[in-house]
Image: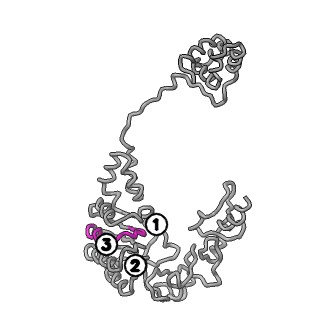
Amino acid sequence: MISFPSKINLYKKFLPSFLPSYASLCSSKPVLILELMHHWTKNMEISQVIEDREPEAMEKLIQKAKDPLPSNFCIIPREEYTIQETKPGPPHEALFLVLAYLPLFELLAMGEVCMSLRDAVHKDVLPWLNIIVERPLNLRLTDEILKNIASKAIGRLKTLALMNCVKITDDGLQSVIDRNHGINKLYIPACTGLTSGGVIRAVKTLSEHNHSLKSLRINGIYNIEKEELEILRSYLQMNLSRQMQQPMLFHHRNLSLFSNKSEPLIDVDICPKCKDVRMVYDCPREACKRKNKKLIQLTASCKGCNLCIPRCEECGGCLESEEIEETACGDNLCSECWLKLPKCNFCNRPYCNQHTHWQCKHSSSSDFVCDVCHERYVWNFT
């Protein structure tokens, strides 16, 4: 390694030889001679040049200086080195308008960005009127965290949706219900920490105060008996008189909580086939509706849970065993929906629209290969 004074002395010694070769370059561009000298000599064995002052070494260094610059070498004028400094300021006003539409995970993260957004998130009531807990927060949500989040609504909570929140108990749910009597949508599917008694107590509290509960989802809560379901219905009877019971369709079961599609008051029923408390689906087929025109509801022959009556994933219609078409994702499809969907190039099996993200596509084509054929044929050949 050569010290800085040694480099300066070396530049001064060879500077008269460099200037004639690069006079035109120096006149046309703002070249800094010391920077060029550093580039030319940094890869040279300078120590050998300093120790050996023979003409061959000097000529070698001069010849190296005459070589063209590499393609990635860029010379920037000094006047472009300065960076304009901008003063920090508050967030744009549009960010405050979208806070009420953010999912809970993004809303909590937004509160950690700066002090202005933190105050807007924690002091504004509007973003907390609809609390929906989904992945990845559902497995971490506890009773204490739920109380803290629900307290930001200041008793004005409208929607409480706890999707697969297994750590929530009856006491934690009831503490939120006691402070928010205006809840009109209560979704607690697959909250296995809840019991049927805790659900009945929460629904009773809401029904006794404002009678505002319009939708209840409790599918996935264990050991709900027929008698307990009847108790829940009795508490919701006043709402039933003001709201006509909507049919439950199989292909609408995964719709968004705020979709415009109508939904039933409660998502479980007593299956007419197996007599268990499950999600019971109606048939949307016109042929099934015409079987008995005198009944307002659909005929009981094709009404039942998914275990008793297989249904098409796309249209929700009931299927006989000979009508079930084979798919790449394993879901059931009717023949009409099967014909409409694109097929795998190898096995000629489609994906339903719920599992189109499993398709293995090429960027230059709309065709696809299912994951099984991709692993069996394409992957092995590559």
Marks 3/2: CA distance?
A: 15 Å
Q: Position of residue 130 (x, y in %)?
A: 36, 63
Considering only order in the chain, which callout, 2 or 3, is on the residue closer to the N terminus? 3
User: What residue is rendered at 66% in x and 30% in y?
Assistant: 71
* Residue range highlighted in magenta: 161-179
In the image, 73 versus 328, the foreground residue is 73
Residue tagged by mark 3? 212
Q: Amino acid at mark 2?
A: Met
Q: Quadrant of the N terminus?
A: top right
In the image, 13 versus 362, the foreground residue is 13
Q: Is residue 147 above or below residue 213?
A: above
Q: Write down the quadrant of residue 7 in the picture.
A: top right
SS class, disc 1: loop
Which labelled disc corresponds to residue 256? Answer: 1
Is residue 176 shown in magenta? Answer: yes
Q: How many marks?
A: 3
Number of other residues with Cα within 10 Å of mark 1, as a class: few under 14, some 14 to 19, many 20 or more: few
Considering only order in the chain, which callout, 1 or 3, is on the residue closer to the N terminus? 3
